[in-house]
Image: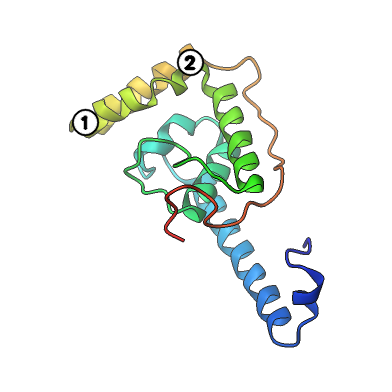
């Protein structure tokens, strides 16, 4: 595990062990959520996740991002509000780039699809529309790299609850 806190804090007799234990808890929660989205059926997915169902690695990364930044399941944007802190903004931009590479022009239509879904269209009909958009705009390389550009800090986005 990479060191996530400054040396002075890591060496502190009270805060060092606390921060280390907290980092382990965060890693475990992220791994659990990632695993959950890797194995989830499309029927179990929140609506926002249907756009990414063809790439479970990217879907899992976005799910962890949304959980970390408290993006509501009913928020039509995949990544929530823009982040202001540099490392979070950089990671959010990388996720957006990966989503755009996967979905192409379908990214622009995510809100349109959301309106269709929120107007009480049957889930199957919505999923069919999403599948049509995904296939129409499929990237020539649907296997996106799964590496990250660093772990962003929580609460670094505009309007974040934390």
Tell me the tag on residue 122.
1
Q: Residue at x 75, y 87 (%)?
A: 13
The type of colouring in the image is rainbow
Quadrant including the N terminus: bottom right
Q: Which residue lies furthest to the bottom in this view?
A: 13
Q: Which residue lies furthest to the top in this view?
A: 136
Left of 29 or right of it: where is 144? right
Left of 72 or right of it: where is 98? right
Q: In this view, does 157 lie above or below 11?
A: above
Q: How far apart are marks 1 and 2 (CA)?
A: 24 Å
Q: Which residue is drawn at 23% across and 34% down?
A: 118
Tell me the tag on residue 83.
none
Q: Which residue is drawn at 63% across and 62% down?
A: 27
What percent of the width, then of the height, locates residue 71?
42, 48
Q: Residue at x 37, y 45 (%)?
A: 44
The residue that disc 2 covers is 105
């Amino acid at each position: 595990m990479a060191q996530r806190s400054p040396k002075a804090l890591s060496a502190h007799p009270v805060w060092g062990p606390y921060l280390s234990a907290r980092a382990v808890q965060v890693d475990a929660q992220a791994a659990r959520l990632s695993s959950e989205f890797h194995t989830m059926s499309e029927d179990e997915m929140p609506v926002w996740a249907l756009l990414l169902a063809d790439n479970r690695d990217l879907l899992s990364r976005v799910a962890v991002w949304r959980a970390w930044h408290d993006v509501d399941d009913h928020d039509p944007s995949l990544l929530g509000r823009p982040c202001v802190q540099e490392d979070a903004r950089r990671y959010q931009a990388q996720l957006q780039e990966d989503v755009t590479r996967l979905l192409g022009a379908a990214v622009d239509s995510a809100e349109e699809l959301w309106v269709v879904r929120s107007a009480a269209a049957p889930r199957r009909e919505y999923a069919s529309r999403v599948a049509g958009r995904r296939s129409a705009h499929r990237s020539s390389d649907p296997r996106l790299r799964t590496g990250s550009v660093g772990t962003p800090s929580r609460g670094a986005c505009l309007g974040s609850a934390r």
